[in-house]
Amino acid sequence: MPALEDLAVSFPDIPPSVMLKIDLLRRGVRMGTAPVGTRHYHHHDEQGQKPMAAQAHLQGSVMLPDGTTVFVAHNPASPYLIEADPDTGQLALREDGRDRVITPLRPGPRFGWTAARTSRQTPLGAVFSQSLGGTCGPLAIFLLRYCEFIKNEEQCRFCSWVRMGKSHEVRPDAADMREALATIWAEQQSIGYLAFSGGSLFNRTKEADAFLLYMDAARATGLPLPTTVAAIQALDRADSARLRDAGFDYACYSMEVWDAAAWEAVLPGKAHSVGRDRWMRCLGEAADEFGAGRVLCNFVAGAETAVPGLYRTPQAAADATLAGMRWCYEQGVYPKWATWIVSGGAVFATREPAPLEYYAHLIKGRQQLYAEYDLPVPATDCRHCLTQSCEGDLAVLDPARYAIGAAALPNWDRHPVAHVYH
Ligand code: SF4
């Protein structure tokens, strides 16, 4: 396993902590003995948010000393181990089986509201979830706790979520939502963004109906809403217009992987229900409806390398994803990426993660796109909530090289760090 200094030698153009972040994401971490544990907020239901151990005290992310925030993904086979000093509680990252400390760590935020209930005894954590451990306190509502692609075993190959959530639809309760959101605002004082998300339905108009229902309930709270984004399947023009009219600031229709062959191999459900061509048409239409830069498209960067024989080299795979990002820009769609996390429960659970060389190539190419296209970085993004990608880390840690074009414009710290009461 590379130490920071080894990463600096192998990838001299990239800040070592950025490469460490990617390595931690793609290989996951193991938790040492007490008192380190975690609540796994990547799971989207109350049960999934139960601590793995009674002594759990990590929720979602850890921070490297330079402020780089990393989503914590569990992997019992990871060579990385997070341990706490038994006397001081100070966290450190170590290589399993060796004494050498790679770096000290700080835990991500641990909010008191996640253990609270509304007056109707609904756990707040069942109404809102912390989103990906962002330290600016972003939230997610998982409204459709069900994905129909599982019916034909056609779930996205990187997705473990379909096996974790409860398979039923839930309805928003405006009173619970109001109480929960008020409690969260009072504690955190910052909510980086509010993402509405969930599984997929074959009937995408019905899927959009649920998003509208939840947005209505959120607006009915009368409380201020942070920047909102609907992460949903690509909708046809009329349904995109409904999302916009309901008040969503952004829509995110994620292609996940770029090439048609990668779609077939990685996204069989999406490929057979909507299809790649129609998905792309929907993205362009949505950009018309929402306006340039208001539609996002995420790529699960690295998942395409798990398809045997698809790409000759890691660089070729990264170039394919970069081509997808370029296509997005040409449509007025802002491309995002997240490091592929090899998740237990996913069809690809036993595949090798994408090599570091893939990411070294991808992140440099992605930053270059900022110089070519002037679409602004969306208001959903800051360095504190991009816990699975590195656009903000690169721009802040090496501005001469990476804060270029549109990446130079935003204040990457623009979402205030959330307050924690305990
Ligand atoms: S659409 Fe894909 S990523 Fe989303 S829940 Fe279904 S299988 Fe998972």
Image (tube, rainbow, N blue to C red):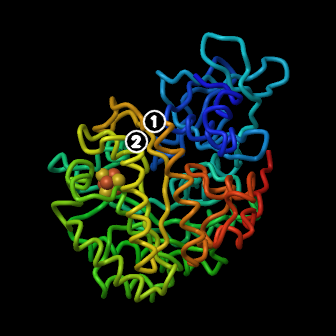
| Label 1 CB sits under 8 Å from any ligand 1 atom | no
Is residue 402 toward the left or the right of residue 25 in the image? Answer: right
Residue 256 % position (x, y): 37, 57
Q: Nearer the viewer, residue 366 or 46?
A: 366
In this view, 177 is above or below 21 = below
Q: Nearer the viewer, residue 22 or 104?
A: 22
Residue 228 coordinates in the image, percent (x, y) = 55, 73
Q: Which marked residue is nearer to the observer: mark 2 or mark 1? A: 2
**For residue 355, which numbered disc appears in the image?**
1
Query: Residue 314 bears which disc, if any?
Result: 2
| Quadrant housing residue 21 | top right
Locate residue 93 relative to residue 196 in the image: left or right.
Answer: right
Taking the spot 45% from the left edge, 89% from the top edge, the residue there is: 245
Q: Are marks 2 and 1 in contact (CB under 8 Å)?
A: yes
Task: Check the image and report above or below for 118 versus 166.
Answer: below
Work out how far the residue at label 2 is from the one at label 1, CA to CA, in angstroms: 7 Å
Q: At label 2, which amino acid type do we have? A: Pro
**Residue farthest along the right direction in this orientation:** 88
Which residue sits at x=30%, y=41%? 312
User: Could you classify mark 1 by the number of other residues whose Cα lies within 10 Å: few (under 14), some (14-19), or many (20 or more)?
Assistant: some
Image position of 161 with respect to 85: above or below: below
